Image (cartoon, rainbow, N blue to C red):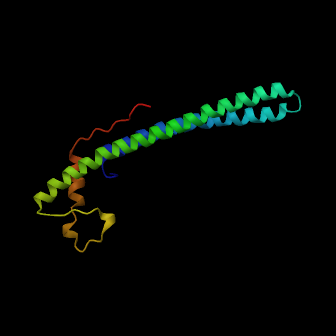
Amino acid sequence: MNNNNEFVSFIDKLSKISDDKEAEFLKRENELIEFQNEIDNLKKIYGNDELEKKIDEYNNKYSFFKSDVEEFNSFISKNLKYNRSIIIENIGNIAKIVSSQNNIDIIIESESYFLASESIDISQLIIEELNKNKIIFEILKE
């Protein structure tokens, strides 16, 4: 996967989105910390009713923040899963063609076995064919 230019480009785009969102989340988190510090300082000044309102307000803001973070993590996960499935499907299709052309009856993922002979390793052929194909990866909507 990391040898395919389109997939690397997709990962770069997703990383940029993630970095931008992370900066936004960091800003919101700092605002929550400031608000929590404000509440701690107001404990000496406010009565219980006013303090309860501020604590409820903080809890609501924190809940929204946590929900937004979870939604974004789900968005990233869905995008990775979806687009990995696209490239894996393409790899599988190419592997069938290459194995047929080279009279290879079985293909095993490299992490699952040891090769006795480099002459039966078709990885480079698959990578070359994969890079010849224009695979369109997409960033799914949030």
- What residue do we see at 15% from left, 56% from top? 98
- What residue do we see at 61% from left, 38% from top? 26
Residue projecting furthest to the bottom = 116
Quarter holding residue 7: top left
Q: Answer with left or right where residue 124 lies relative to residue 8.
A: left
Q: Nearer the viewer, residue 38 or 48?
A: 48
Quarter holding residue 22: top right
Q: Is residue 9 visible?
A: no
Q: Answer with left or right where residue 25 lies relative to residue 52.
A: left
Q: Answer with left or right where residue 41 lies relative to residue 113.
A: right
Q: Nearer the viewer, residue 67 or 86?
A: 67
Which quadrant is home to the C terminus?
top left
Query: Taking 42 as reference, is 116 above or below it?
Result: below
- What residue do we see at 20% from left, 57% from top? 125
Q: Is residue 6 visible?
A: yes
Counting labels gives 0
> Where residue 10 sits: x, y (%)?
37, 41
Query: Taking 22 as reference, is 101 above or below it?
Result: below
Q: Answer with left or right where residue 2 lies relative to residue 63.
A: left
Q: Nearer the viewer, residue 60 or 7?
A: 60
> Where residue 128 sits: x, y (%)?
22, 53
> Where residue 109 sits: x, y (%)?
29, 62
- What residue do we see at 41% from left, 40% from top? 78
